[in-house]
Image: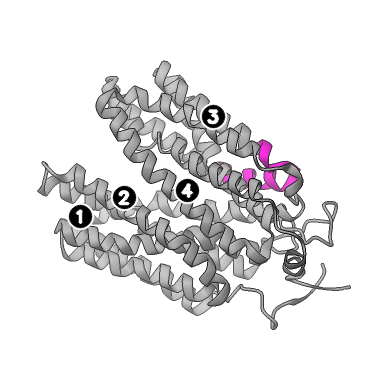
């Protein structure tokens, strides 16, 4: 039997679009989930320091949460492929995020905070996979690019607004109040999730199966998928370069401009988010017209340029301007990562497992990044650290250029044999 790789796309074009209620519900889920998750991260360290925790204990619980998120990606993806209702996974994950925030706020003891951050780490990664799966199940492969662009716009908007809101809460109330606010954001998140009608989601399609295959079709392996392995390798190198950029820049600014470093770092964080809000829908549309590979090259190529700028100067104005490039990279990867995985796993029933694999590779690269660049900068200086980052980023661009195929379905690659 011969089938087409984008037969799901053809079905997408002939089936009615999901009702606006479900699509706007997904908008709200992206918005409020980003807000809830923004209550963690730097605020946890600041609050625990305020509770007279040692730096060693703070570092341990944060590292444990990070490793939990990393290790949960593959089993989380396999779990999402297996269960029929991805909405239940999101609801359970949101409840765990709220529970973790409340534990930190009410009982900031070492064992309980450790449990809370491990819970948050596990669910934080899986929730992103689940939202991509719901998006695919709602709109199908054919218009997934534009949907992912919209998801990214609402997630970035939620992150920016919540970051400002949390900062005001910490200033006028306390760091503890931030975690109550993060838990409270789960309530509108669940309300938005309830607006997504289960009947609007093709749950077989949400796992990467084509419509004609049905939910009982056998799942196929993805470990021999050359394109997926290359893409995961590119993501690994990208994150190994990217993850340590802002920490190194923040350290340099703190040493040179102590009075203004916190404001400058805040600007460095917010500028890329604003760019993502502006560019994400555009990137989703261009992914369907230009193809995936050209956009990937733009996103990956922005990173070595940015690293060279950071190596050249510590001028705050120039650094903030250079963060526009970070917004370009964030837009491209935020929109295209799940889209390319969907391209490469169409018909396999392993979309979420493959998402978990790519996420794991990205997480390992990010974990190595801060250690390796910190050692290089500590031994040879700040500029050497950023030059090392630029070299790794350029390697990622070359790997992408030389080996990564175009994954957008086309007339030349539609026909595939069923396995």
Res 139 → quadrant: bottom right
The mark found on residue 270 in the picture is 2
Measure how far apart labels 3 and 2 are at the Cα level: 25 Å
Name the chief secondary structure element in magenta: helix
Mark 3 = which residue? 187
What span is colored magenta in the figure?
A: 72-88
The residue located at (16%, 49%) in the rendering is: 253
Earlier-in-chain disc, 3 versus 1: 3
Mark 1 = which residue? 379
Secondary structure under the numbered disc 2 in the rendered image: helix
Mark 4 = which residue? 155
Decide: marks 2, 1 in contact (CB < 8 A)?
no
Measure how far apart labels 3 and 1 are at the Cα level: 48 Å
Residue 354 seen from this side: yes
Residue 295 pos. (x, y %): 47, 72
Quadrant for the N terminus in the image: bottom right
Decide: marks 3, 2 in contact (CB < 8 A)?
no
In the image, residue 87 lies in the stretch drawn in magenta: yes
Density class for disc 3 (Cα within 10 Å; few <14, some 14-19, many ≥20) is some
Quadrant for the C terminus in the image: bottom right
Q: Nearer the viewer, mark 3 or mark 2?
A: 3
In the image, residue 302 lies in the stretch drawn in magenta: no
Measure how far apart labels 4 and 2 are at the Cα level: 13 Å
Density class for disc 2 (Cα within 10 Å; few <14, some 14-19, many ≥20) is many
Secondary structure under the numbered disc 4 in the rendered image: helix
Measure how far apart labels 2 and 1 are at the Cα level: 30 Å
The residue located at (70%, 82%) in the rendering is: 411
The residue located at (35%, 68%) in the rendering is: 302
Residue 83 seen from this side: no
Measure how far apart labels 1 and 4 are at the Cα level: 38 Å
């Amino acid at each position: 039997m011969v089938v087409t790789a984008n037969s799901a796309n053809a079905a997408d074009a002939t089936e009615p679009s999901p009702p606006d209620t479900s699509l706007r519900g997904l908008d709200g889920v992206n918005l409020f989930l980003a807000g809830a998750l923004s209550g963690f991260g730097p605020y946890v360290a600041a609050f625990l320091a305020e509770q007279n925790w040692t730096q060693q204990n703070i570092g341990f619980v944060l590292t444990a949460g990070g490793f939990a998120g990393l290790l949960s990606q593959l089993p989380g993806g396999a779990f999402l492929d297996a269960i029929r209702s991805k909405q239940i996974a999101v609801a359970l994950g949101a409840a765990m995020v709220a529970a973790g925030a409340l534990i930190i706020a009410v009982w900031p003891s070492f064992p309980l905070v450790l449990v809370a951050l491990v819970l948050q780490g596990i669910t934080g990664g899986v929730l992103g996979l689940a939202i991509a799966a719901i998006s695919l199940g709602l709109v199908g492969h054919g218009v997934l690019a534009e949907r992912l662009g919209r998801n990214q716009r609402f997630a970035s908007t939620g992150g920016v607004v919540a970051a400002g809101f949390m900062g005001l809460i910490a200033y006028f109330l306390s760091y503890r109040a931030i975690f109550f606010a993060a838990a409270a954001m789960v309530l509108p998140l669940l309300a938005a999730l309830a607006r997504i009608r289960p009947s609007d989601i093709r749950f077989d399609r949400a796992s990467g199966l084509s419509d004609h295959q049905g939910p009982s079709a056998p799942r196929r392996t993805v470990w021999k998928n050359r394109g997926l392995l290359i893409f995961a390798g590119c993501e690994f190198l990208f994150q190994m370069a990217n993850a340590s950029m802002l920490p190194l820049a923040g350290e340099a600014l703190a040493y040179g401009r102590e009075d203004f470093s916190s404001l400058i770092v805040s600007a460095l964080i917010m500028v890329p988010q604003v760019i993502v809000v502006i560019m994400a829908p555009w990137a989703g549309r261009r992914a369907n017209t230009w193809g995936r590979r050209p956009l990937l090259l733009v996103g990956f190529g922005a990173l070595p340029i940015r690293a060279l700028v950071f190596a050249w100067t510590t001028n705050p104005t120039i650094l903030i301007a250079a963060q526009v490039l970070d917004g370009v990279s964030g837009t491209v990867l935020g929109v295209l990562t799940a889209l390319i995985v969907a391209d490469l796993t169409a018909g396999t029933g392993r979309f979420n497992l493959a998402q978990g694999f790519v996420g794991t590779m990205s997480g390992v690269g990010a974990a190595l990044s801060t250690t390796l660049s910190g050692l290089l900068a500590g031994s040879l200086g700040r500029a050497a650290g950023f030059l090392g980052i630029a070299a790794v980023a350029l390697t990622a661009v070359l790997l992408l250029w030389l080996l990564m195929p175009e994954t957008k379905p086309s007339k030349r690659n539609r026909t595939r044999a069923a396995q």
